[in-house]
Image (cartoon, rainbow, N blue to C red):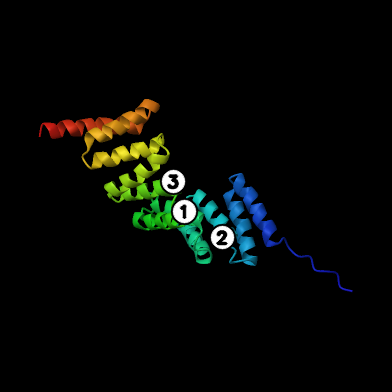
Amino acid sequence: MDKPIKVPDDAKSLHKDGLEFQQFGRHEEAISCFDKALEIEPHNAEFLYDKAISLQTMLRFEDAIKYYDAVLKIESDSFASLINKGLCLSTPSINRQEEALLCFEEALGIDPDDLGALSLKGYSLDSLGRYREAIGCFDKVLEQQPNELNISVNKGLALLHLGKYDEAIAYFDKVLEYEPDNLFASEWKKDAEKMREKDLFS
């Protein structure tokens, strides 16, 4: 009687090994495990997603986007894939803000109450110069999280772009009250004061 053939590590075991490597920041080894798992189960959305996470962490944004797209072909309602794809698209090296905005809007279609997705939509709108719409997003976040300082800084900056200097300064002051060393709020407050003075005497 023939001896049973030894089966190599199955996909789940390879995936588990990949997650362990990922946890310790060993992303090349993690990707190697995910690739072997994907050879066995090429359409496993979880494997594809976790490979995308490692690629994104390694700043290989274009490659990560391809894998998030592969997940979304299988699971079109993958909230996390939409968010992470949007984050990749919005990085300065990629800077495809219109596409990033669409990702965040799709994510909000899945979970309209997610404040993280709403914040990211606001950041994308701000990057596109759509300041009033960005402020609308920031206001909704601040209604729920009034002490979210990053949002307050970004709302102040959007107001500054719209020439609403006093309102912008008020938001920067709010941030500086909680974080006196916040460099962004401090510098943009100075810019707002200079621009306000220039307008007064022009």
Secondary element type, mark 3: helix
Q: Is 162 left, or right, of 113 in this rendering?
A: left
Which amino acid does the dot numbered 2 rest on? Answer: Leu
Q: Is 32 left, or right, of 159 in this rendering?
A: right
Secondary element type, mark 1: loop
Determine which quarter of the picture holds residue 46.
bottom right
Q: CA distance from mark 2 to mark 1?
A: 22 Å
Which amino acid does the dot numbered 1 rest on? Answer: Asp
Nearer the camera: disc 2 or disc 1: 1
- In the rendered image, the quadrant that contains the C terminus is top left
Any mark on residue 115, and which? 3
Say which label, 2 or 1, has the lower sequence index: 2
Asked if residue 76 is positioned above or below residue 23 in the image, the reply reads: below
Find residue 199 and report its horizontal and vertical position in percent.
Answer: 14, 35
Q: CA distance from mark 2 to mark 3?
A: 26 Å
Query: Residue at label 2?
Result: 48
Pointers 2 and 3 in contact (C-beta within 8 Å): no
Q: Nearer the viewer, residue 37 or 77?
A: 77
Find residue 190 and report its horizontal and vertical position in percent.
Answer: 26, 30
Q: Is residue 149 visible?
A: yes
Query: Residue at label 1?
Result: 111
Determine which quarter of the picture holds residue 170.
top left
Which residue is at a point 22% across and 38% down the rendered structure image?
Answer: 164
Say which label, 2 or 3, has the lower sequence index: 2
Nearer the camera: disc 2 or disc 3: 3
Q: Residues within 10 Å of mark 2 (few under 14, many from 20)?
A: many
Find residue 126 and report its horizontal and vertical position in percent.
Answer: 31, 47
Q: Is 59 left, or right, of 196 in this rendering?
A: right
Q: Residue furthest left?
A: 202
